[in-house]
Image (tube, rainbow, N blue to C red):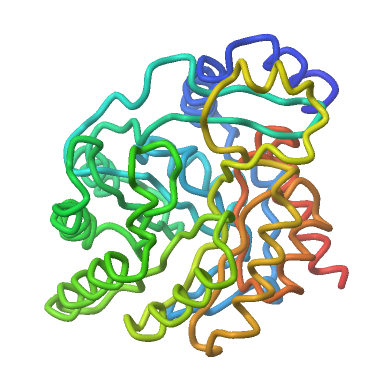
Amino acid sequence: MYKTLIRPLLFKIDPEKVHYLIVDALKAGYKLPLSKTISNSLFQVTDPRLERELFGIKFPNPVGLAAGFDKDARLIDEFANLGFGFIEIGTLTPKPQPGNPKPRIFRLPPDGALINRMGFNNGGVEEAAARLRTRKSKVIVGGNIGKNKVTPNEDATSDYLYCFKALYDVVDYFAVNVSSPNTPDLRALQEKEPLKQLLLALQEQNGKMPKAKPILLKIAPDLNESQLNDIIEIAIEARLSGIIATNTTISREGLTMPGATVNEMGAGGLSGKPLTKRSTEIIRYLRQHLPAEIKLIGVGGIMTADDALEKLQAGADLVQLYTGFIYEGPALISQINRKLLAG
């Protein structure tokens, strides 16, 4: 029903407007009588065999919502009702910011892809933390944190520490985002020394808290082998709990949509099917070279249950959806979980 009826209608509307229509629809639907019961029967798959325990957290199933969809933690309860095993909010910054000029999301239907240059648009970390304190669902929540656009890289650590402290009481784990291509110079923080200093500073603060929270690093798919080796070294030295592989790509290779049309869309991160192979390659490489205690979350181009299974077989412990959720609808969550149960 979603792919044959709902998606064609939604795809006639500007992508960002559709996002807010979905937000409003989910919030309204969640309040209707029997909505939770119906949603549970359609999308929830509950089975002990789906449970995964990572860094001291028991995930009810391995399928999560990637950062970027619920930036401001507005839909935690609603998304939990769709069967996600965990939800990652953000990317959040210390101060609210509008993000980049519109239009800033573009669909590439022939490629099953999106291009976005949102630019960390969010209402600020304090506002999101306040919402999380009033949520009803007990779903696992990750806090994806970044820096404000106006903050120079040499002061970036203070932004990440601010977000860490603001979210500490209301999230289960942290994801450090230095890999978005849509904030100027942000990816420079992936270089060895700046990244190491940032992560060590976060871990130092983590050690001062009543209980240390898992810290994960989200990396770009555009890193070469030497850079991946640096990431591995830093992950071990900084005692990371995990790595999220991968963010969107700046590459435009292999697209079937005409180059002129793609060029008109402009800069931004490409997500979806064109990213499937590369993100899986990175997961496989990381799993081969990282110690077992550093876990992996696989994200990037999961458009089918088989794509998710491939990432798990390559070494991912959990997976996350974003573009696949938009193209395939909420049924994809249960399809993945049922595929895992079927063996």
Q: Is residue 86 above or below residue 283?
A: above
Residue at 77% x, 16% y is 8
For residue 198, say whether it is visible.
Answer: yes
**Quadrant assignment for the C terminus:** bottom right
Residue 12 pos. (x, y %):
69, 9
Q: Is residue 296 above or below residue 171?
A: below
Residue at 62% x, 48% y is 321
Q: Is residue 211 above or below residue 260?
A: below
Residue 240 horizontal side relative to residue 281, left or right? left
Residue 304 horizontal side relative to residue 215, left or right? right
**Quadrant assignment for the N terminus:** top right
Residue at 70% x, 57% y is 278
Residue at 81% x, 18% y is 5
Q: State the image quarter where residue 319 is shown.
A: bottom right
Residue 122 pos. (x, y %):
31, 33
Residue 290 pos. (x, y %):
54, 85
For residue 37, say whether it is visible.
Answer: no
Instruction: Please state which of residues 31 and 304 is positioned toward the viewer in this rendering.
Output: 304
Q: Is residue 183 above or below residue 154?
A: above
- Residue extending furthest top? 12
Residue 47 horizontal side relative to residue 95, left or right? right
Residue 287 pos. (x, y %):
62, 80
